[in-house]
Image (cartoon, coloured by chain):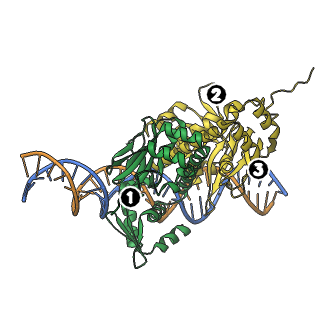
Chain colours: A green, B yellow, C orange, D blue
DNA sequence: CGCCAGGTTGATTTCGCTCAAGCAATGTGG
DNA sequence: CCACATTGCTTGAGCGAAATCAACCTGGCG
């Protein structure tokens, strides 16, 4: 059997299936080749740090496989999970564009493969192709939208509603439909982290989960959730 | 006496004292002249809308005099005040850069003069001077930082702490030092709006204010606040 | 004058935090 | 293999903070 170079993710950018869905999609052939040869791909163990708050920004990261969490630690040591990123997402573009130090920490949520692209390479690419800068601008803009939406949510919704929102978001990414119409979710993060995402204590989240089970909307067991009637969750949001 | 054109704010951009402090500072002579002749300045009455959520973006605004509030209204009709902008600040650059509809509403907080710059002019300027786009990128980046910081605040601080933070911010802009070392603030917004900014009901804010007065930190009367010991406010934040 | 928006105040209930104990799964060193 | 600590999660009791509902006050303003 002839061995052929497959479009194995992470092998190189040219055949990377994620590239069409992220900022790199505006790059032309030669530019992609430059990117492909400059990028360094490595594996991360679950929980391993990709970068940490305060350190200088040397470049940006591009997730090939797995997932990462961005978190910030405030003065009192509370750690707040800001967002989860998935294959195709780029990380750390903010520090890069502004020449600042890292504002957050990022860590692998499970075994992951993540490429690193040096600052200089990105700068070169952006000079050759101005559309790339615009892509990152668009990206930051979307992040800002997300943040503003969360601000409004925090101001108006109850903890339960916020958690239901979070659960629906996680369902989008991690849910598999079961034959009976329910959804099975494999949670990528701990309950503490979920609690921090909705701005509540973990004990409170535990009780919220208890109430959701009482109401028969979902069953929780470790990191697997079974949402019996996904529709009723959406209902709940609509009228809250 | 010879009448001479003074550097009256709003008369034209070339002599506008704010220009050195906002995104336009990277423009060169000819570019500023283009900006100056293209911009349209008009007065707004207190409470008048500059633009409203959902309408298409035709250009950006630049505050000459006065102040504006950006607010978002969610599904249930709750209105949340996102941020206050001051002379020199630009408004509506997000919709412009992304070609989207307005996500928020903006309104004048008091009698204001605000310039309008058409989409086409901004685009022309950004093509002639790429540094301008970078300025807006920097600006969005700062906004994102603010939003993230607020998110962390919301997750960890009490309503009282959040209000003290807000009060200190307002003091920076609207405070005048009194001879006895206290600060007198002329609040630009209603208590309802302040309540929405910290994610609390207006009754709750009323009570918080009551407690602050009991504690002797400040005296509130209508829209004027007298902060007796500004230092003790900062203390309160540090240890909360 | 009545009306109204913005603000205060009170009574009551709900919600969420704190502190504390207990439990299950996992790892570790002897 | 067991004793032991550790980590993540759950549960309960008590308490304080904040939401809700409602009354009332106040200063414009037609």
Question: Is there a contact, CB below 8 Å, between mark 1 and mark 3?
Answer: no
Instruction: Kindly identify which numbered label has been placed on residue B48.
Output: 3
Relative to the observer, which residue lies in front, D18 or B81?
Answer: B81
Of residues A195 and A8, which is closer to you in this image? A8
Residue B139 placement: quadrant: top right
Looking at this rendering, what residue extends furthest in the right direction? B1
Asked if A159 appears above or below B172 in the picture, the reply is below
Viewport quadrant of the C terminus of chain B: top left
Q: From the viewer's perspective, is residue A214 above or below residue A57?
A: below
Mark number for residue B178? 2
Foreground tag (1 vs 2): 1
Work out how far the residue at label 1 is from the one at label 2, CA to CA, in angstroms: 79 Å
Judge the density around disc 3: few (<14), some (14-19), many (≥20) Cα neighbours within 10 Å: some
Residue, x 55% and y 32% (percent of image)? B230
| Residue A229 in view | yes
Q: Is residue B70 left or right of residue B15?
A: left
Mark sitting on residue A4: 1
Position of B93 relative to A3 (above/below) = above
């Amino acid at each position: 059997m002839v061995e052929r170079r497959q479009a194995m993710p992470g092998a190189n950018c040219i055949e990377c299936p994620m590239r069409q869905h992220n900022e790199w999609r505006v790059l032309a052939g030669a530019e992609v080749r430059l990117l492909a040869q400059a990028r360094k791909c490595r594996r991360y163990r679950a929980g391993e740090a990709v970068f940490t708050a305060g350190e200088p920004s040397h470049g940006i990261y591009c997730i090939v496989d797995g997932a990462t969490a961005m978190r910030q630690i405030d003065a009192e040591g509370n750690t707040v999970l800001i967002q989860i990123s998935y294959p195709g997402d780029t990380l750390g573009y903010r520090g890069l564009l502004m020449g600042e130090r890292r504002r957050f920490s990022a860590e692998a949520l499970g075994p992951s493969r993540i490429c690193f692209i040096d600052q200089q390479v990105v700068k070169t690419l952006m000079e050759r192709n101005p559309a790339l800068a615009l892509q990152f601008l668009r990206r930051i803009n979307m992040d800002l939208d997300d943040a503003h939406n969360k601000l409004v949510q925090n101001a108006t919704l109850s903890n339960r509603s916020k958690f239901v929102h979070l659960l629906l978001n996680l369902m989008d990414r991690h849910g598999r439909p079961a034959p009976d119409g329910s959804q099975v979710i494999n949670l990528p993060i701990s309950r503490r982290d979920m609690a921090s995402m909705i701005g509540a204590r973990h004990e409170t989240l535990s009780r919220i989960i208890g109430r959701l089970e009482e109401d028969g909307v979902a069953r929780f067991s470790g990191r697997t959730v079974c949402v019996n009637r996904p529709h009723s969750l959406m209902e709940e949001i609509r009228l809250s």
